[in-house]
Amino acid sequence: MSAQAAREGERFYQRLAAHAGVPYLGLDPAPGGPDPVSPDAAQLVPPGVARELGVVPVALDGEALVVAVGGLDDEETYRMLRTVTGREIVPVVAAPAAIARALDRLYGPRSAARRLGLPFVSLDLPSPRGPDPVNHTVAQSFAEDMCRRLLILPVSLHDGVLTLATAAPPGRLELGLAVAEALTGRRPQVVVTTPESLERAIGRAFAPPPYPVPVERIAPAPEEERRRLGALLLATGLLTHAQLLEGLRIQERVGGRIGEVLVHAGLVPEEAVVAALAEQLRLPVVDVSKIRPDPDALALVPEPVARRNQFVPLAISDHVLYLAMADPLDDDAVAELRRHTKLPIRIVITSRPGIELLLQRTYSTRYVRVATTDLLNRTPDESAYRVLTWPQRLGFAVLAIVFVLCLVYSPINTIIAFNVFSVLFYTSFSLYKFRMIYDALGHSFELPVTEEEVAELDDRELPVYTIMVPLYREVAVLPMLVDSLSRLDYPPSKLDIKLILEEDDAETLLAIRALELPPHFKLVIVPDAQPKTKPKACNYALIQAEGKYVVIYDAEDRPDPDQLKKIVVAYSKAEERIVCIQCKLNYYNRDQNLLTRWFTIEYSSWFDLFMPGLDAADSPIPLGGTSNHLVRDKLIELGAWDPFNVTEDADLGVRLHKFGYKTAIVDSTTYEEANSDLYNWIRQRSRWVKGYIQTWLVHMRHPVKLWRQMGWRSWWSFQFVIAGTFFGFLLNPFYWCLTTLWLMTKAGVIRELFPGFVYFAAAAGLYIGNFVFTYVNVAGVLRRGYPELVKYALLSPLYWALMSVGAYKGFFQLFYRPFYWEKTVHGLDVESEP
Amino acid sequence: MNGPSRIELLLAGGAADPRALQAETILGVLERSARPGERPEEALLDRGLVDDREFALELAARSGLEYAGLRGFIPDPRLFLYVPVATAVAQRVCPLVLVDDSLKLATVYLDPDLLAVRTRFPNLDLDLVIAPRDELLDALRLVAPGL
């Protein structure tokens, strides 16, 4: 109706009212103004009666009810209204169109939605070629007749939640909901729409597809075969009623789809769910393990889209795109695919692991390239690919030449000057470390997380969590690894555990396959390519990570069972710039031998005192090798781990600080296996020292810029913590030898190297240093609650000597094998418990 | 309204064929008119004894009201909010047009009972015109198909 016709109509009814001598009422609310219809009056007349009579109760006038009518001379209307309301009726005139609008406002679907607190939606196409708001596959999971009869339509399925559109009047709504709940086994999310919009949507959803589909797809399924997943699984005999009930109980607690829940709970094999889903949706199942996707089909969809949505375009045939999907009900995936191709789609179902392995196989070259060169390409200055830049080479060469010339020209004075520098270094390094640890002794700098907060977490709200476990020849510790990860208090269906294997490690691969792990354990096989480092493997897996948070555990790690939940709580309370939460590391085999005791002492001091101290001082924290829980998106933004740095964790800790982010510490411990074998220990330590040197060289390529980025406090902290650690280990043997030589020979030349002021300063430094490092070790084990280790802490100087051996090994290796990963053998003690 | 009796008008105006007006017919008409609420003219018109168009013209001429032919006329349904369809059918009237505060009504007879309309719409003037019965009933059938 045109506006002019509408105005003309209104004028007619205004005159009608005037002729009758009764008021005329415009029922449409003014823009932004109140509704002239009183809800109190409206509720006196049942919606059906008001619609039938074409009247709107608008107000109460004392005991009388004012009713808007389109005509005045229908005594039957008044009589009925009097009967229904028990009140006298006072008519006012309104235009029928306005009455219809008012009735729609009062009693229509929008109003019903408002009253029930439900969203109102339109199911119509936004444009003729626009995306359909109704997922036809989801819609077809209900019978068309039933949808029409009950005025309901399942329209989408997101994260396991079915959305059901209804146009049923309130009295009939519950029936539709009950039927939907009985069919799906869960309460759907309800949206309200108009009957007309619902009718059009049903027509579209059940219309024959416009593209050729297999006969079995378009053949109408007998009604008795249109059974839901649970019933189909029961029918296979692979699932009992008791198991289904258990699955439904788990689903109620943690959310997710019933199929996934059943599989993750180990109640039914994944293959059975895939087969049942295929039967339910009338889609073919395809084993993709032997399929090589057609490049033309792959070219249609960018790799990140395919990966994000877990589908793989397989082929194009007769202008139809064949698509392998694990979840054909995923609306978002189909909608995103539609943005890249308008070709008709024919979906084939495969298992989720099948899709993951197909994605890896299809895009492995790209993944390796990204894992290896992403950081290098994006920010070459942040990569350790080049050990030394040309300015650094020049600088070190000049320094070395000057030092040698000075030695030649005036050897005693040069060494005295070097001694002064060393004394200053030792003293300031010792005092800095003492200050950090002393501060941490009196405070609790960790992000506080209480057991109550962990207990209050709703499992349904927990995010997906990615756990990465890089493995290389780790067959010995596999059972323990699986046991430790299975103890984690986190819903399995929300765990994305990546067991990262190297392609040439067939032994571990076979061992894992033999374990028949549940589906949240996912295999990532990294193609054999250089550099063969843990960070490259982790980057490779990160590309496929699904979790909001990502954590790395080593093969032998035993994290506290509530660690992941503690991190979720901690992140919910943390400031926005915290993108990494480091948990504490310690050892479960501390009593194995002297080496493991020393190692435990070192870690207790480092993770329980030094790291919290650094955190409180807002200094860069060199992350521990495992149990650093990172926000995935931020990690990717930062360029992830440097595949050329053999202490990629320490480097990442510095990098994230440099770019304005922060690491926090949470009081949760991961127990690892302390190296109990001396050779193995030295290999590991040599890698750490080599990595610290790499890290220092990388970030000191532009020292002034680094100063500006970090600020002076953090800059100095970086020097002490990173450079101080390896420099001290390298320097120590020199002075230990000199001291021993002096004690044995009292050689005059040594006395010359330490004139009075240097001698006393060095002696002070020696006492301070030894006191500080012994003190922090003792404090660390006492804080950790291992008082029996105190006596071993007093023997720490022997341990420092071993550290220097490892340091020199790593230092020299930097020149000829900078990226070589000294593999630490695990499983030398698999009996101990934390 | 004052004026000649209905039968007089019929006979004097020549609307009726005198040859057809046999005694028994007249008697029959009178018998029927004895039924409460029924007009004798209806019986004459029903039997074809009187031509409705001639009758309407004669009535208009004698009463001074306008004559309005309604062949092909489609009434405005909204105007039946003034004159309910039941009233219109019973009183043989049909609303034609609303001009300002005046509603023009076609009527077959000179004295339709419109008291209810006047009571409901005291601020409305009713302007009557005469129309042939069959044409008026055809128009009413468009809004009251069962008529």
Image (cartoon, rainbow, N blue to C red):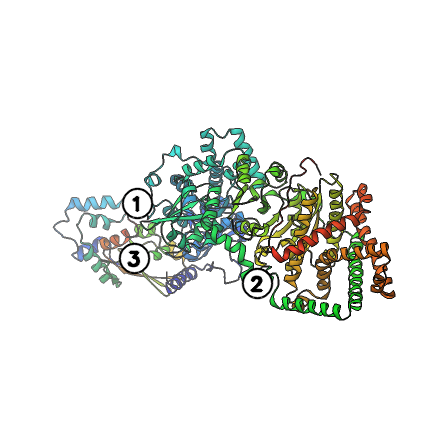
Q: Position of residue A392 (x, y in %)?
A: 64, 66
Q: Nearer the viewer, residue A482 or A575?
A: A482
Q: Which residue is mark 3?
A: B75
Q: Which residue is mark 2?
A: A380
Q: Which residue is mark 1?
A: B36
Q: Secondary structure at mark 2?
A: helix
What's the CA distance linking mark 3 and mark 2? 86 Å
Q: Please give the label number shown on residue A625.
A: none
Q: Is residue A375 left or right of B101 when viewed as pictured?
A: right
- Quadrant in the picture for residue A832: top right
Q: Residues within 10 Å of mark 3 (few under 14, many from 20)?
A: some
Nearer the observer: mark 1 or 3; the answer is 3
Q: Is residue B49 left or right of B77 when viewed as pictured?
A: left
To which chain does the residue with label 2 belong? A
Dot 3 and dot 2 within a common chain: no
Sequence-first disc among 1 and 3: 1
